[in-house]
Image (cartoon, coloured by chain):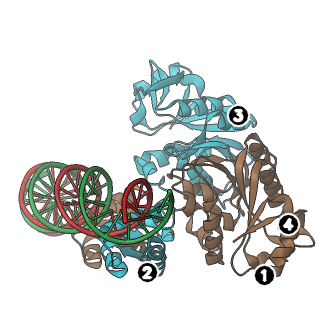
Chain colours: A cyan, B brown, C green, D red
Amino acid sequence: MNFQERKQIIIEKVETNGSADVKELAVLLNTSEITVRRDLAILSDKGLIFRTHGGAMKLSLSYDPVDFVNKSAVRGEQKDYICQIAASYIKEGDVVFLDCGSTVFRICPFIRNMKIKVVTNSIPIVNALLNSSVSLNFAGGEIDMERQASHGYVAIEHFTRYRADKAFLGVDGISFANGLSASSEKEAEISTALAKYAKESFLLCDSSKFEKDKYLPFAPINMANYLITDLGANESLINQYESLGIRILK
Amino acid sequence: MNFQERKQIIIEKVETNGSADVKELAVLLNTSEITVRRDLAILSDKGLIFRTHGGAMKLSLSYDPVDFVNKSAVRGEQKDYICQIAASYIKEGDVVFLDCGSTVFRICPFIRNMKIKVVTNSIPIVNALLNSSVSLNFAGGEIDMERQASHGYVAIEHFTRYRADKAFLGVDGISFANGLSASSEKEAEISTALAKYAKESFLLCDSSKFEKDKYLPFAPINMANYLITDLGANESLINQYESLGIRILK
DNA sequence: CTAAATTTGTTCAAAAATAATCAAAATAAT
DNA sequence: ATTATTTTGATTATTTTTGAACAAATTTAG
């Protein structure tokens, strides 16, 4: 019994059964477990099966739907509150830029039924607005797997083609001393571009991010026209921010 | 029973039942409660379920990625056969164009572990290849909801920025008399562009589409270099097609 | 609001599976 | 026939998974 024959049998077993474990296959193939493992490694490399701990399974059973929704559930209530307010500033016919943060993502349910155009670089947003009444436009370019969004030169250039009425931006940190900050250059670049090519820009930022400085400060607070936050925000801090030229909505 | 199998069962239970508790699942899966908790934590992290005290609940996603996967399951075996062959022509380091058809979509499991660049206008493909070893690039532009893909002037222009080693194209109809045909202008435009900017282009087309003319014939058969089809294809028809300058692989 | 009950997170040890290494067997090449 | 190459199997070390025990946190009942 050579590899080709074993391969046939393994694939058939996995396909008909949905899965198979190493022990079982070793008996079936009348060979040692180590050989089965080696075979499974090869078949998995070729993408014919999905290797699991202890065996293998059919590829079609190994699919994972998008995993962004739950991350956005951290401080979900505040984010929903913020997004509801944000959505109330959007009116029919608007062209809207949405960036790829987990806060901005939560605006989707509130705008699904609006007749607007959305330009975004966020894959989860596209998924959430598919088959809605929103007209979608995705910024092309290289996809950043972690952020589930396009980024880089091509993506930025995409946004510059369009003119939006409103841009909604997430931000990782905001402080009186250093303004807006991001955890990555990519995010900072995109946010800056969106703000630049939109008539009005709204920062969506829950109060836990106030007075936090992240890795890269990239713009003064007044890069955005409005800051939408939750009710837990400190009043005197808000006044300080407003003194820098941003309008606070809550 | 390993994690992947338990995951299947847990998700199915939660989806059909709306919710499930830890005790119940431990019995169902014939394992300990601590293991169930760990599984639920993982699934919840991935955003597949919503974790509650004592169990888990269904997470109502507005978008159901399973939908497209199901549609693409029509003649699924032929499509898988075709895609497996298609994938075997891709090698490490290739830049690959993938169009938005349901046949081409099925190539995803076979290329997930390859170190290649994929440029596509298909949202389902992007979703299927997220968090894989494939480097992704999405063609920006307006999104066609029905086709779940970008289209139009901007999308086409996006592809023209890049040069691919291989393009994999779906097609709605192929006939000796009229060549390749599509059900919509959008598809035809994209296919043409992909073929033009790739060194080699592969048509993925199951034999049920042979000698079918759709709404818009848009190119001669030899626009593509190769036609990959299933074993059910008529031999004399294949010879006729080959005489028009395309190489048949199966 | 407090106490009891339940659920969860953490730490640790056992068990199972895998990876790595090396030797033996089978196969191919000269 | 002999040498090189590939494939397989055995052994050991490492990693992953699992379950138990117990402390911490959360919910429920009173």
Residue B234 bears which disc, if any? Answer: 1
In percent of width and height, residue D29 lies at 16, 69
Give the labeled residue for mark 4: B180
Q: CA distance from mark 3 to mark 4?
A: 34 Å
Q: Nearer the viewer, mark 3 or mark 4?
A: 4
Q: Quadrant of residue D20?
A: bottom left
**Chain label for disc 4:** B
Q: CA distance from mark 4 to mark 2?
A: 39 Å
Q: CA distance from mark 3 to mark 2?
A: 49 Å
Q: Which of the two residues, B64 or B166, is positioned nearer the viewer here?
A: B166
In percent of width and height, residue A2 lies at 43, 73
- Are the residues under marks 4 and 2 on the same chain? no
Q: Is residue B159 left or right of residue A215?
A: right
**Chain label for disc 3:** A
Give the labeled residue for mark 3: A157
Question: What residue is rendered at 41% in x and 62% in y?
Answer: A41
